[in-house]
Image: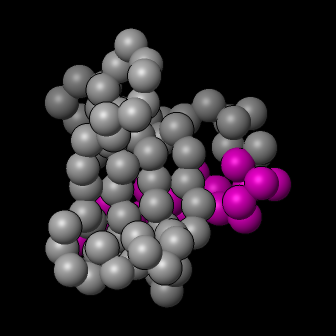
């Protein structure tokens, strides 16, 4: 799997959420809870994934580009309710 992102957006994300997109890409190496983002309102399908990057539980918004590329749009620490959702598996 390949990961891509806009570097300017990555820098803004680090300042706002303290999470780099490189760190966020690590969640895809493990089990994630992934679901369609019905509120995205964009021209492309967007998904939300919750998973572990090291010891941090992260929530990552992404889109798929072809069969083997994930474009990361945003990433942040998961909220307590998202952590519970991940633990329940839905």
Say which quarter of the image contains residue 19. Answer: bottom right
- Counting from the top left corner in percent of width and height, residue 57 is at 46, 76
- Counting from the top left corner in percent of width and height, residue 25 is at 44, 56
Residue placed farthest to the right in the image?
15
Q: Which residue: 45% across, 53% down?
A: 60
Say which quarter of the image contains residue 89. Answer: bottom left
- Counting from the top left corner in percent of width and height, residue 79 is at 52, 72
Q: Is residue 44 above or below residue 2?
A: above
Closest to the observer, 46 or 9: 46
Magenta-highlighted residues: 13-31
Is residue 44 shown in magenta?
Answer: no
- The answer to whether 52 appears left or right of 67 in the picture is right
Q: Which residue: 59% across, 61% down?
A: 76
Main SS of residues in magenta = helix
Residue placed farthest to the bottom in the image?
55
Q: Which residue: 39% across, 13% down?
A: 43
- The answer to whether 43 appears left or right of 68 in the picture is right
Q: Is residue 30 above or below residue 42?
A: below
Q: Which residue: 72% across, 64% down?
A: 18
């Amino acid at each position: 799997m390949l990961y891509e992102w806009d570097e300017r957006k990555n820098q803004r994300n680090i300042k706002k959420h303290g999470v780099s997109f490189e760190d966020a890409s690590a969640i895809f190496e493990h089990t994630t809870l992934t679901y369609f983002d019905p509120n995205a309102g964009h021209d492309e399908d967007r998904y939300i994934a919750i998973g572990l990057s090291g010891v941090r539980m992260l929530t990552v918004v992404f889109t798929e580009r072809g069969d083997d590329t994930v474009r990361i749009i945003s990433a942040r620490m998961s909220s307590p309710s998202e952590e519970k959702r991940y633990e329940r598996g839905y």
